[in-house]
Amino acid sequence: MNQMTLLLVFLGAGLATFLIRLSFIAVEGRVRLPSWFRTALQFVPAAMLSALIAPDLLMRDGQLALALDNARLLAGLVAIVVAARTRSVGWTIAGGMATLIGLTWWLHRLPQ
């Protein structure tokens, strides 16, 4: 793929993203969205975050990795517990990252 094609793809993707976001801002107050749609929109951020994070936690080298040697999965589970208990983004990130770092260090020190 040459540089001009790549540039046009980036510009097109940027324009499409801008127009999608602008459409919600432009119609605000002019169009009355159904209540079921407004309710469903509340779940979009959590669904998007889950869709971005789940493959990283569950997959390793293109294969499903549901084992105790999957440090990312275990750290993700710890982060979920911390989030449920504290309702704090900061503690969730700190707990998940500390667990990931600790487990990664520990798993690499184990004999193969």
Image (spheres, rainbow, N blue to C red):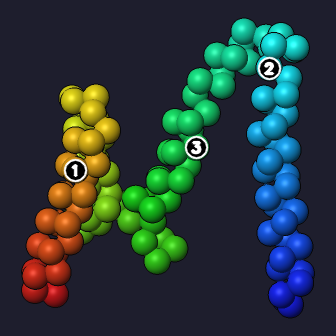
105 or 21, which is in the foreground?
21
* Image x and y of residue 50, in percent: 50, 45
Residue 101 screen position, x and y as percent: 20, 66
Q: Residue 48 carries which label?
A: 3
Q: Which residue is drawn at 27% across and 33% down?
A: 88
- Location of mark 2 (residue): 28
Counting residues from the start of the chain, the first of labels 3 and 1 encountered is 3
**Nearest-to-viewer mark from 3 and 1:** 1
Lower sequence index among marks 3 and 2: 2
* Label 1 neighbour load within 10 Å: few <14, some 14-19, many 20+: some
Of the image marks 2 and 1, the number of the one nearer the N terminus: 2
For the point 80% across and 69% down, the residue is 10
Task: Please tell me which residue lies in front, 42 or 104.
Answer: 42
Disc 1 marks which residue? 94
Q: Nearer the viewer, mark 3 or mark 2?
A: 2
Q: Which quadrant of the view contains residue 65?
A: bottom left
Does 109 sit above or below residue 15? below
The part of the image, by quadrant, that contains residue 86 is top left
C-alpha span from label 2 to label 1: 37 Å
Which type of secondary structure does the marked residue at label 1 adopt? helix
Give the numbered dot on residue 19: none
The answer to whether residue 62 is left or right of residue 31 is: left
Cα separation, mark 3 vs mark 1, equals 21 Å
The amino acid pointed to by label 1 is Ala
Q: Which residue is drawn at 86% across and 23% down?
A: 27
Q: Vertical placement of 30 versus 103: above or below? A: above
Residue 5, horizontal then vertical, whole percent: 89, 81
